[in-house]
Image (cartoon, helix red, strand yellow):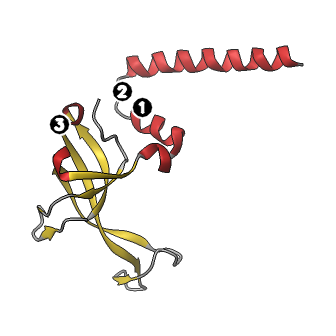
């Protein structure tokens, strides 16, 4: 299993060229949005500073505490694990439900049916446990 997982918060350990031109410097923050070949490479959304959109739709500098502010995306690039440093694992930021939903998006209908059967089994088990406690 890879040291990095889907939706982990990461930073670049070295500068990388951006597909659209320019360079993302060392220390650029990002989030893993796709995992290739069981962690041989990752698609990472890279971010610049905090911004917010003005009335014309242009981005203006902001700070993270301002309402409607967000981190501007500067690129989505394929990065090797050697170029990344883990900042915060996804399990600490998006919770179990978010992680499950992300995994479900990548499964076949057959696997989804298996998961549904298992989830219904767990639901029945939980309901039986509640009845037993009464």
- Closer to the camera in the image, 78 or 15: 15
Residue 76 screen position, x and y as percent: 22, 57
Residue 28 position within the rendered picture, expressed as x and y whole percent measured from the top left:
25, 65
Query: In the displayed structure, does residue 29 sit left or right of residue 114?
Result: left
- Residue beneath disc 1: 104
Mark 2–mark 1 contact, CB under 8 Å? Answer: yes
Q: Evaluate if marks 3 and 1 touch, with contact meaning CB atoms under 8 Å apart.
A: no
Q: Mark 2 or mark 3: which is in front?
A: 3
Residue 40 is labelled as 3
In the rendered image, the vertical position of residue 126 relative to residue 62, given as above or below: above
- Which mark, by number, is residue 107? 2
Residue occupying image coordinates x 25% and y 65%: 27
Between the residue at mark 3 and the residue at mark 1, the CA separation in whole angstroms equals 21 Å
Q: Mark 2 vs mark 3: which is more N-terminal?
A: 3
- Picture quarter containing residue 42? top left
Q: Which quadrant of the view contains residue 124?
A: top right
Q: CA distance from mark 2 to mark 1?
A: 5 Å
- Disc 1 packing (10 Å; few <14; some 14–19; many ≥20): some
User: In front: mark 3 or mark 1?
Assistant: 3
- Secondary structure beneath disc 2? loop
Give how far across and how far down residue 3 sits, in percent. Answer: 30, 38
């Amino acid at each position: 299993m890879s040291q990095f997982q889907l939706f982990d918060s990461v930073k670049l350990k070295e500068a990388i060229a951006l597909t659209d031109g320019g360079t993302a410097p060392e220390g650029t923050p990002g989030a893993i949005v796709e995992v290739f070949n069981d962690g041989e490479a990752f698609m990472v959304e890279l971010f610049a500073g905090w911004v917010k959109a003005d009335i014309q739709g242009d981005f203006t500098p902001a700070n993270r505490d301002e309402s409607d502010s967000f981190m501007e995306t500067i690129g989505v690039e394929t990065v090797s694990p050697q170029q990344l440093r883990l900042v915060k694992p996804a399990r600490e930021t998006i919770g179990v439900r978010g992680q499950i939903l992300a995994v479900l998006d990548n499964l076949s209908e057959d696997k989804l049916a298996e998961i549904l059967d298992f989830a219904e089994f767990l639901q029945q088990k939980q309901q039986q446990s509640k009845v037993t406690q009464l």
